[in-house]
Image: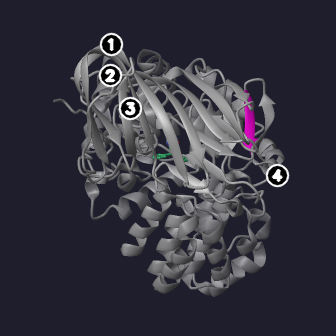
């Protein structure tokens, strides 16, 4: 037995899945997906096949000839879920599993009509990273094994299904009021990148290879916000090589989507909180696009090497931003990133091993290990390497790294060997070991440089002149608001001058509200309550709930959570429960 992923039962002495075919009926009334999935192997084989499942009911297992195969669904274990062990006769090419999901499937959020913008149709979406695909499909849920797939979804006729794949057609000639949508994913992906959504969706083209999907009342605003996507793709191709996924479509999610974005291939998911009206929050779009190279082409072999996905992607995101928004904007973004990194290191004071780039996650749920460390420490490590190697040399190496590991899955050691072979002794010069296996942030980490940042830092605790602050971008506001604590009287003054409690830019608003709660500025509390009831993005829920608790308002926090927990995503719910337990 050889299990190489600390979060999967996948055993590399067994057959490997090459592709899956999923036929599924979505039962919105009962919040159940009834599926039949065929797993086809790279080569025929026999013996035991261990699959990952979570909260699945397994009905039957057959081989490709229709013969019933014996299986055992073992009791669920923490983090992993339940091992489904199937006995394969020698020479088996494929297995076909009939199953259904649980209404509590950790990858699925079923939204009632009232939780959508339109208010009349339900909505369903998946979020599989890191180890939730197994709650939708029984499979070998490790990013080391790439698969192609085909999907047929039977849905209510009034709705539309979108999948992170190529559309192959829709038929409405079935009985009743259902429709069938067919999709096919020709590029092999790690299972965590499987994704779909079903709802009342409309679209608008942004370029020949990109369109945005959203609920009808949101489409125009989303199209305006994300109109710069083609410029970003062009910039990214020049930096990282050809775009390998044909299309780059965007799905604007309902507000309960727990992340800022998710790089589902061919169909990036984005939180609607990015729609600020002025395109000021599109760095998240640049980030998800950048994953098309770093993460989706070159994939972490398991969650212990997550920094290879996210650190590289933050680096790539800031390269794209430099081209599309300018050096100053990219540097301000990096400065804010450094602030978030320091906060994350502080948050893990009791678990400093989670501040390493390479982590050991046996017994740890990747959702619990999630932080800005792999993102920003990873970014600053790559920036340190770049500073020693030189920009052009580093850029050439990065392009080659992507080309060499394209459609592969790698570990930190694979990266180290590749880098050392290409640019000998640079790793030693930045003390790479200290970055990778050490805790916290090395003292000689590079610093972001920007005149605007210096101007904000020079303000200290002072209130800015309107002429200055009215020209600030959201990032400058965040850098200002998060720099030092301020008394409630200063908060009142800032609010009177700049209307911060009324801000419709969520990044600015949440920074402000966290400051206001910490300062005891009571006038902001109703807005805090409102935000906690209207968005489910964890980046906002976490600091707001934490600020309430730090300010001795635990009962307010608990009451708000009790009111809204039902509308939060299962992953967000678990995260807030953790914050409230502290
Ligand atoms: N892949 C991540 C989201 C993710 C990570 C989902 C781990 C599940 C487990 C995505 O690319 C991401 O990093 N999103 C960020 C935005 C980004 C600009 C830093 C987010 O959601 O905050
Ligand atoms: Zn990312």
Sooner in the amino-acid sequence: mark 2 or mark 1: 2
Q: Is residue 80 magenta?
A: no
Where residue 292 sits in the image (x, y, percent)? Answer: 55, 29
* Residue that carries the numbered disc 1 in the rendered image: 43
Quadrant (top left/top right/bottom left/bottom right) for the N terminus: top left
Q: Is 569 left or right of 452, judged from the image as shown?
A: left
Q: Distance between the residues labelled 2 and 3?
A: 12 Å
* Residue that carries the numbered disc 4 in the rendered image: 217
| Circle on res. 143 | 3
Sooner in the amino-acid sequence: mark 1 or mark 4: 1
* Residue that carries the numbered disc 2 in the rendered image: 16
Sooner in the amino-acid sequence: mark 4 or mark 3: 3
State yes or no: discs 2 and 1 in contact (Cβ < 8 Å). yes
Sooner in the amino-acid sequence: mark 2 or mark 4: 2
Q: What stretch is highlighted in magenta?
A: 210-214
State yes or no: discs 2 and 3 in contact (Cβ < 8 Å). no
């Amino acid at each position: 037995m050889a299990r190489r992923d600390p979060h999967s039962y996948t055993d590399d002495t067994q057959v490997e899945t090459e592709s899956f075919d999923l036929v599924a009926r979505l039962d919105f009334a009962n919040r159940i997906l009834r599926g039949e999935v065929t797993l086809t192997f790279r080569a025929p084989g026999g013996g035991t096949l261990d699959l990952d499942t979570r909260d699945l009911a397994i009905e039957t297992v057959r081989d490709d000839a229709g013969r019933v195969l014996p299986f055992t669904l073992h009791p669920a274990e923490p983090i992993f879920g339940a091992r489904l062990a199937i006995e394969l006769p020698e020479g088996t090419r494929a297995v076909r599993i009939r199953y259904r999901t649980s209404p509590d499937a950790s990858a699925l959020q079923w939204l009632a009509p009232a939780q959508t913008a339109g208010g009349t149709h339900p909505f369903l979406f998946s979020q599989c990273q890191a180890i939730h695909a197994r709650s939708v499909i029984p499979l070998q849920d490790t990013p080391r094994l790439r698969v192609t797939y085909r999907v047929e979804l039977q849905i209510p006729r009034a709705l539309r299904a979108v999948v992170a794949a190529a559309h192959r057609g829709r038929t409405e000639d079935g009985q009743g009021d259902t429709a069938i949508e067919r999709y096919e994913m020709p590029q092999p992906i790690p299972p965590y990148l499987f994704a779909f959504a079903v709802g009342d969706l409309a679209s608008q083209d942004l370029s020949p290879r990109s369109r945005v999907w959203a609920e009808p009342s949101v489409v125009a605003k989303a199209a305006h916000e994300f109109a710069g996507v083609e410029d970003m793709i062009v910039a990214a191709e020049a930096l990282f090589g050809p775009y390998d996924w044909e299309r780059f479509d965007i799905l604007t999610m309902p507000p309960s989507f727990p992340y800022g974005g998710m790089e589902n291939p061919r169909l990036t998911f984005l939180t609607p909180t990015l729609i600020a009206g002025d395109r000021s929050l599109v760095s998240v779009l640049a980030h998800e696009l950048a994953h098309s190279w770093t993460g989706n082409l070159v994939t972490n072999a398991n969650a212990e090497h997550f920094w290879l996905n996210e650190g590289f992607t933050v680096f790539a995101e800031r390269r794209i931003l430099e081209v599309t928004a300018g050096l100053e904007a990219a540097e301000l973004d990096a400065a804010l990133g450094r602030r978030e990194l320091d906060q994350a290191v502080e948050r893990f004071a009791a678990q400093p091993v989670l501040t390493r780039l390479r982590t050991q996650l046996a017994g740890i749920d990747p959702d619990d290990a999630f932080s800005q460390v792999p993102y920003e420490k990873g970014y600053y490590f790559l920036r340190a390497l770049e500073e020693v190697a030189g920009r052009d040399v580093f850029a050439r190496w990065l392009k080659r790294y992507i080309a060499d590991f394209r459609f592969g899955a790698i570990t930190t050691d694979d990266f180290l060997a590749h880098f050392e072979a290409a640019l000998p002794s640079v790793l030693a010069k930045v003390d790479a070991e200290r970055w990778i296996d050490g805790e916290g942030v090395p003292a000689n980490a590079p610093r972001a440089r920007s005149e605007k940042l210096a101007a904000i830092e020079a303000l200290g605790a002072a209130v800015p002149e309107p002429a200055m602050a009215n020209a600030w971008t959201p990032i400058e506001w965040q850098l200002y608001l998060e720099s030092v604590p301020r008394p409630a009287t200063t908060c009142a003054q800032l609010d009177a001058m700049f209307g911060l409690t009324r801000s419709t830019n969520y990044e600015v608003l949440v920074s402000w509200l966290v400051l206001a709660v910490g300062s005891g500025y009571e006038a902001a509390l109703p807005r805090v309550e409102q935000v906690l009831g209207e968005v489910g993005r964890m980046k906002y829920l976490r600091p707001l709930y934490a600020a309430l608790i730090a300010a001795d308002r635990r009962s307010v926090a608990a009451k708000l959570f009790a009111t809204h927990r039902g509308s939060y995503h299962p992953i967000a719910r678990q995260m807030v429960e953790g914050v409230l337990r502290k």
